Amino acid sequence: MIMYLLKLNIALILLFIFYKLMFTGDTFFSWRRATLIGMYFVAMLVPGMDFSAWLSNSEGMTSIANEYATVVLPVVSISSEGRGALGWEGIALIVYSVVVCVLLLRFLWQLIFIILLKNNSQTAYIHDTEVYVLTNDEGPFSFFNWIFINPERHKSDEIEEIMMHELTHCQQLHSIDIIFAELFCVVFWFNPFVWLLKREVRLNLEYLADNSVLANGKDNKEYQYHLLGL
C-alpha cells in the first residue's frame, strides 16, 4: 500500500510538471483535454510497473523517493509488544476510509441536487434549445444535456453567448471529465496534485467552451466583459 502511494505520488508530480511545461501559455485546448485524462490513467498504471532497476541507477529519482519517505511517510518502530493493538497502518486506513466516505457522499449529494433541481424547475426554450429556468441568483451551468439558466438576470446578447458556451459543454460531453476528476479526488484525496489536476481539467473545459464562443464570431473584449459580469 505504501509503495503504491509512493509511486502514484511521484508519477503525478512528474506528469503534472510535464503538463505545465508542455501546455502553459498555448491554446491547444483539445490536446490539453486528452493529455489530462491520459495522465490519470498513466498515474494509476505506474504503480503496477517495476522501475526498481531504473530508480536505483537514477540519482534524481532516488533523491525524490528518499525525500518523500522522510517527509511524508511516518517513522515506525517495530516491537514485539502490543501486537494486538491497532497499529498506525490500521489507523491510517480508518482515517482514509472515513474521508473517502465523506467525499463520496458529498459527490453523490451534488448529483442528487442537480437531478432534483432539474425535476423541480420549469422548462423554456432559448434559440430552440430546452433549458431549465433558475429562479435564484445562481449562475448558469450545464450537466450533460441539461442547461440551467435564469434568463431574467442576463441581457439578450449575454444569453446568446451563454447558450453557445453551455451547448459546447453539452455537445463535447465535458461532464464526463468533471465526474472522472471528482471521483479521482475522492479516492486519492490525500494527494495535493490530484486537486491541482482537477483544477486544470475544469479550467481547460472552460477554455474550450470560451474558444467555441469566440469561433462563432463574438467580439473578444465584449465577451471578456460579460465573463467578468458573471
Image (cartoon, rainbow, N blue to C red):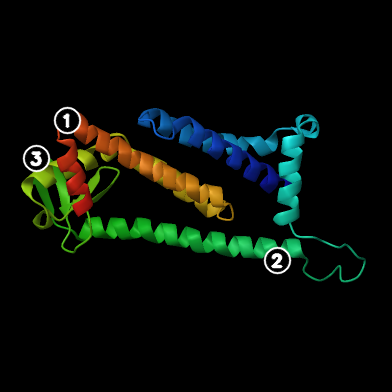
Q: Is residue 199 above or below residue 85?
A: above
Q: What secondary structure is marked by label 3? A: loop
Left or right, 195 with reference to 151: right
Element class at badge 1: loop
Q: Quadrant of residue 34?
A: top left
x then y, percent, for residue 101: 53, 62
* Residue neighbourhood size for the residue with mark 1, other residues' Cα within 10 Å, grouped as few (<14), some (14–19), many (≥20): few
Q: Where residue 91 is drawn, which disc sits there?
A: 2
Residue, x 74% and y 32% (percent of image)? 51
Give the CA distance from mark 1 to mark 3.
Answer: 15 Å
Whether pointer 2 and pointer 3 mark residues with C-beta atoms closer than 8 Å, the reply is: no
| Classed neighbour count for the residue bearing mark 2: other residues with Cα under 10 Å, few (<14), some (14–19), many (≥20) | few
| Upstream in sequence: badge 2 or badge 3 | 2
Q: Is residue 163 visible?
A: no
Report which residue position mark 1 lands on. Answer: 216
Could you tell whether 110 is left or right of 118 in the image? Answer: right
Which of the pair 48/21 is nearer the observer?
21
* Residue on which the image places disc 3: 127
Q: Secondary structure at mark 2?
A: helix
Disc 1 residue type (three-letter): Asn
